[in-house]
Image (cartoon, rainbow, N blue to C red):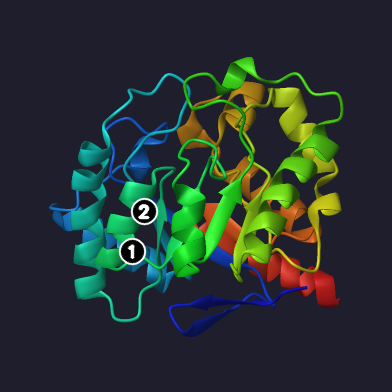
Amino acid sequence: MKDTINIGGKLLDLQEPIIMGIINITPDSFHKDSRFNPFDEDFLKKANEMLENGATIIDIGGYSSRPGAVDISENEEIDRVIPAIEVLSKNFRNITISIDTFRSKVAHSAIRSGAKIINDISAGGLDSEMFPLVIKNNYPYIMMHMRGNPETMQRHTNYQDLQCQILEQLYSKAHFLRKNGVKDIIIDPGFGFSKTIEQNYNLLKYLSIFENENYPILIGISRKSMIYKLLKIDSSETLEATAQLHLKTLFAGANILRVHDVKSAKNTILLYQMLKKS
């Protein structure tokens, strides 16, 4: 398996699972405790807490992709994320920041401000300029499976073969980028995007088929509706169930956990490592 990613000249080791901490610069992301204003003191406090608890990457997003979220302009998204990236870069030496966006203009602005990785929920599907940007600059790139867009995605849940169709879409795009010189590509099967609750658990059950030699796997399952809707609880009550599902994904080959709760994820990784070597 490809076990390193080149992040601006620094090799990120993936021989053991790592953690990506989520910080949203949005007023309407589904999990309220992930929402922050970069001009508030608690923003830096949260970032510092995540780094101290074991986060390797901090993922900054300024566009809520939950179903029914309000659409915003590129400029508004830029106005949200750039101050956050600049503040983090100024206050934390050698921090690795990813920009969670499907827009090439936002991604380019974020990279110029200090972000090192592009995390694209659409795998290039919502902006025709995203792949040319990634190819030209050889940026580390996370591509997620989704059909449609955040507003319409839950209308596109009809699959003949769930795993095979997701694999085909992601790998065909990843191979295209690889052929065009992009060296560091991470795939995300897209839990919660264009999938019913039942499909999400079927995807989780057979997640190991995504394990491969060329593309590390990122899992974004933290506190999602596939947990709280199934259990009929609030997202604030999903910490324990999230940890249980994270353990399942680690045994299936996950390399990066994208999470709201870094300390819990770190503990889950430690348990996984002990179980694996026992």
User: Which residue position is annotated with label 1?
Assistant: 111
Residue drawn at x 65%, y 19% is 156
Q: Residue at x 14, y 52 (%)?
A: 40
- Measured from the top left, where is residue 231 in percent x and y? 64, 25
Element type where label 2 sits in the image: helix
Q: Where does residue 42 sit, x and y in percent of width and height? A: 21, 55
- Which residue is denoted by mark 2 in the rendering? 107
Is residue 30 shown above or below 267? above
Q: Which mark is residue 277?
A: none
- Residue 68 can be seen, yes or no: yes
Would residue 141 be found to the left or right of residue 51 on screen?
Answer: right
Residue type beneath disc 2: Ala
Q: Quadrant of residue 44?
A: bottom left
At x 57%, y 28%, the residue is 225
174 is higher (above) or lower (below) than 189: below
Q: Position of residue 122 (x, y in %)?
A: 54, 40
Q: Nearer the viewer, residue 32 or 7?
A: 7
Is there a contact, CB below 8 Å, between mark 2 and mark 1? yes
- Mark 2 vs mark 1, CA separation in Å: 6 Å
Measuring 39% from the left and 43% from the top, which residue is drawn there? Answer: 103
- In the picture, which quadrant includes the N terminus? bottom right
Vertical side of 208 occupied by 152: above or below:
above
Mark 1: secondary structure: helix
Q: Dot 1 surroundings within 10 Å: few (below 14), some, or many (20 or more)?
A: some
